[in-house]
Image (tube, rainbow, N blue to C red):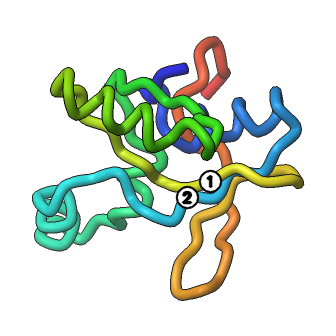
């Protein structure tokens, strides 16, 4: 899947389809996004989870294959962002300071009435 409709939408859809819990423990963003959010009184988590238009691929990888995939990506100059993990359960959560914060699907929905 891709993140063009928002990371919260993509991860919630992946959770629904797989019947697994997704836990994000690293925000997939650069320092300038934090700076932009701070200088414009915006919530960086809202930008990261509910913004869109990035068209980044969102995928899961079996932990036993992660080292091999990272090596391949580095060799081929493919940028990867490891943002969390998948476990038994359901839903999407952001792990911050040892606490799990539920991430609701607030991204873009095609054909949704305003």
Does residue 9 sit above or below 5 in this rendering?
Answer: below
Which residue sits at x=43%, y=57%? 46
Residue 98, percent across and down? 60, 86
Most foreground residue, 109 or 60: 60
* Of marks 1 and 2, the one in the foreground: 1
Residue 78, percent from left and from top? 23, 27
**Residue with the mark numbered 2:** 24
Name the residue furthest top. 111
Q: Secondary structure at mark 2?
A: strand
Quadrant where the N terminus is found in the figure: top right
Out of 69 and 28, give the one closest to the viewer: 69
Q: Secondary structure at mark 1?
A: strand
Label 2 neighbour load within 10 Å: few <14, some 14-19, many 20+: many
Q: How many marks?
A: 2
44 vs 18: above or below: below
Say which quarter of the image contains residue 18.
Answer: top right
> What's the distance in space between the residues labelled 1 and 2, CA to CA?
7 Å
Query: From the viewer's perspective, is residue 45 above or below residue 75?
Result: below
Please give the residue where the numbered disc 1 appears in the rendered image: 85
Residue 108 percent coordinates (x, y): 53, 29
Q: Earlier in the sequence, mark 1 or mark 2?
A: 2
């Amino acid at each position: 899947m891709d993140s063009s409709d928002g990371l919260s939408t993509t991860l919630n859809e992946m959770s629904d389809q797989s019947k697994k819990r997704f836990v994000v423990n690293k925000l997939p963003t650069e320092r300038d996004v934090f700076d932009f959010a701070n200088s414009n009184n915006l919530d960086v988590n809202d930008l990261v989870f509910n913004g869109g238009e990035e068209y980044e691929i969102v995928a899961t990888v079996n932990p036993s294959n992660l080292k091999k995939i990272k090596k391949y990506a580095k060799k081929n100059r493919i940028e990867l962002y490891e943002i969390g993990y998948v476990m038994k359960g359901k839903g999407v959560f952001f792990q911050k300071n040892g606490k799990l914060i539920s991430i609701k699907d607030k991204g873009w929905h095609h054909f949704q009435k305003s």
